[in-house]
Image: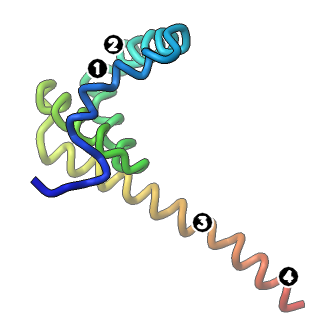
Amino acid sequence: MQKTYYDPADLKKFGKISDWNEELGKKFFDYYGKVFEEGALSEREKSLIALAVAHTIQCPYCIDAYTGDGLQRGITKEEMMEALHVAAAIRGGASLVHGVQMMNKVNKLDM
């Protein structure tokens, strides 16, 4: 296995973040659990959203977790890839729209 800064085994240690502050850890996990419960969106839809967001924020642990979760919920590889492209398009667009700030600055300095 190739060495990486992110150790895949650390994903299983996620629950241990409560060890050094039980109160805040419990509050976070209570919230996290509530967020992923069935609501206006299905648990399957939420898993697909989480996978797309995981790619956008580039969290290898989340990508690992929600790829597996999505497969268990019947999300196809085609649906995963399409969601990834949606995330990439939004991220790319967000980068480009910030170019307006650059253009405004250039226009201001050129005056």
Earlier sequence position, callout 2 versus callout 4: 2
How far apart are the alpha carbons under marks 2 and 3?
A: 34 Å
Earlier sequence position, callout 2 versus callout 3: 2
Earlier sequence position, callout 1 versus callout 3: 1
Q: Residues within 10 Å of mark 2 (few under 14, many from 20)?
A: few
How far apart are the alpha carbons under marks 2 and 1?
A: 5 Å
How far apart are the alpha carbons under marks 1 and 4?
A: 49 Å
The residue pinned by badge 4 equals 108
- In this view, which residue lies farthest toward the right? 111
Return the residue nearer the eye: 27 or 87.
27
Return the residue nearer the eye: 65 or 81.
65
Earlier sequence position, callout 2 versus callout 1: 2
Residue 76 image position (x, y, % from top left): 12, 39
Return the residue nearer the eye: 61 or 70.
61
Q: How is the image coloured?
A: rainbow
The kind of residue on which mark 2 rests is: Glu
Which element carries disc 3, helix, strand or loop?
Answer: helix
Instruction: Using the image, determine if residue 50 lies above or below residue 81.
Output: above
- In this view, which residue lies farthest toward the front? 20
The residue pinned by badge 1 equals 43
The residue pinned by badge 3 equals 97
The residue pinned by badge 2 equals 38
